[in-house]
Amino acid sequence: MIGIVGAGAFGTALAVALAKGGREVRLWARDPGQVLAMQTTRRNEAALPGVDLPKNVSIHAEIGDVCGGQTLLLATPMQALGALLDAWPEVDATQPLVACCKGIDLATLRGPVALIEARRPKATVGILTGPSFAADIARGLPTALTLATAGEGAALQDLLSTPTVRLYRTDDVRGAELGGALKNVIAIAAGTVIGAGLGDSARAALMTRGYAEMVRLAEALGARAETLAGLSGLGDLVLTCTSTQSRNFRYGAALGRGEGTDPIGTVEGIATARAVQKLAQGIGVDMPVTAMVDALASRRISLEDAISQLLRRPLKQE
């Protein structure tokens, strides 16, 4: 049995894919009303409209019902992960814990794996990340992801792979964490460029320079540059910066158009930009794109000033 904590779009999509791959899946939702609706309709219309849940997916209101199996996937928003672990001791070290969220915790400046390890030091912990939209996974479209873990990687890779979701594994957990977190920040910037009407050439330049600062921070924190060149970094960056399916891209596009930007759903890049700025400043790493995203999202700077400041940066060798 595979347990999944969190019945949002991604958690539900993973449940569908794994069940179609022959696994028994137990899915937990915090809201009892959502649990009842999903049990009755066999759908999660709010998150994945039109997608039927296979018969080997069961939906539960008690978190203990999904724990204790072969592994537990934690598919909650990054900024809610610490609170969930504090509130639910049932999520323990008796099975591998795999984070399925992307970001940096604002309170601790830790990624999801480091956050879990701090609260569950005896657990085997990993992260599942990479270029993927929940709707594509749920529809059975081919998807490749990175599974990063320091231990039991091969066993987890076999368990969590399906005919349509192909997993590649790495032991560079830090690099995988950072790639998934930082690409959301750059996606907001890319959306802003397109929303402001600056064009595809400007977006390509922004993505390239954004990728450079992703690698710069990752290496400063002990990650490997080649990890950032893989699915969890460059692959996810390309997807998120070029598709309106990305909430981070859509949020940035609204910023660029000067529209209201109250996000619907979780826009992880907003909090991540703020956390990364603190992290980067603390170790002396220059992150100009991230700094501009943080300033724009917090209304400390206008779009015109942000563009001007980036274009006035000193000329230098690439």
Image (spheres, helix red, strand yellow):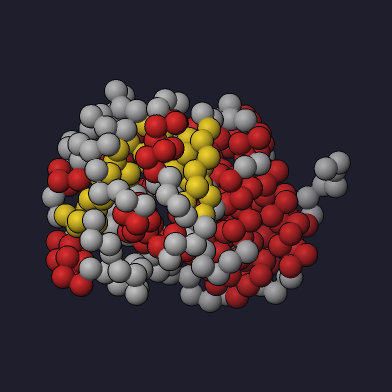
Q: Which residue lies furthest to the top in this view?
A: 122
Residue ID at (48%, 35%):
148
Residue ID at (79%, 54%):
312
- Work out which quarter of the rendered image holds the N terminus and state it: top left
Q: In the rendered view, would you say 57 is above or below 167? A: below
Residue ID at (23%, 68%):
42
- Work out which quarter of the rendered image holds the C terminus and state it: top right
- Residue 11 horizontal/vertical position (percent): 34, 55
Residue 118 at least partly seen: no
In the rendered picture of this protein, how many numbered marks are placed on residues? 0
Tell which of 149 and 288 is nearer to you. Answer: 149
Tell which of 175 and 314 is nearer to you. Answer: 175
Residue 63 at least partly seen: yes
- Residue 88 horizontal/vertical position (percent): 19, 41
Q: In the rendered view, would you say 30 is above or below 232? A: below
Q: Is residue 217 left or right of residue 98?
A: right
